[in-house]
Amino acid sequence: MKDIFFLVDEHSSQYSFLGGIRDHMLADAMTLMTKIVQDITIGPNNAYVGLTTYSHTVHKQFQVDKWGTNQDVINAIKQVQVHGRHHGTDDIDDALTYLLYDAMTTGKGDRPNVPDVVVMITDRASVQDVHTLMHSRQLQLISHDIITIEVERHPSSSTFGQLATDAAHAFHVSGSSAILTDAFKQLILNMICA
């Protein structure tokens, strides 16, 4: 039994163009979430899943206890409206603040005696802001399973992995198609269900 919170960056990266890497990353992130949901049991005595997206603002897609069956969650993922096609800075700090003080509260369906898992997906992240790192540490006090997935065309020395529980929970993959493999899905699923 877990409460699973997906946090997906929908901001346009420097490689953004219609039909380009950014659009593929978002579609592939949604496909990965769908595959994971298909392989877990959703319900009050099992897992719950919530989804938040962010760009220059936070978009509360659905809270963790909104949907009670696998098919409900899959349908909700398919209905996600993407808002982030803009250039500039994304606001991961606001997204982490939302998780900490809103999404991961009992008033929004988080179950107090159920372990929380956070899965963050981006295709461009550099974490330098002190507040972001501070919120990350606060999040780690609530959840011992914070998984980061960074998708890039050209792997770099990103600092996004610092948000993960530890190095074993930080993934840096080259190209969004890498997150669609059964092996990668199983790796993430094993961490979520551990």
Image: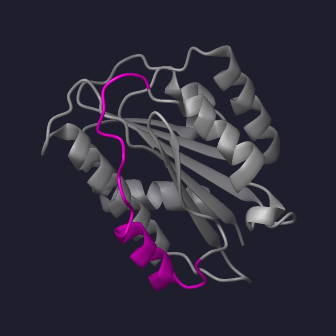
**How many labels were placed on the picture?**
0
Q: Residue furthest right?
A: 113
In which quarter of the view is residue 138 placed? Answer: top right
Q: Quadrant of residue 156?
A: top left
Query: Is residue 82 in the magenta section?
Result: yes
> Quick check: 78 left or right of 161?
left
Image point (67%, 44%), residue name: 98
Residue depicted at x 69% and y 79%: 46
Q: Is residue 112 above or below residue 170?
A: below
- Return the x and y of residue 84 as percentages of the image width and height: 35, 41
Q: Residue at x 68, y 15 (%)?
A: 130
| Quarter where residue 94 is shown | top right
> Which portion, as a residue range, is magenta?
67-89
Residue 103 covered by magenta stretch: no
- Give the image's coloring scheme: one colour
Query: Residue 126, image x and y in percent?
Result: 47, 20
Q: Position of residue 149 (x, y in %)?
A: 45, 41
Q: Quadrant of the N terminus?
A: bottom right
Q: Is residue 110 visible?
A: no
Q: Is residue 184 above or below residue 40?
A: above
Q: Is residue 111 above or below residue 21?
A: below
> Which residue is pictured at 46% across the width and 33% down the height?
56
Q: Is residue 104 visible?
A: yes
Front residue of this view, candidates 167 and 7: 7
What is the x, y in percent for residue 146?
Answer: 64, 44
In this rendering, position of residue 95 left or right of residue 70:
right
- State the residue in front, 188 or 27: 27
By secondary structure, the bulk of the magenta-drawn segment is best described as: loop
Q: Quadrant of the C terminus?
A: bottom right
Residue 175 relative to residue 88: left or right: left
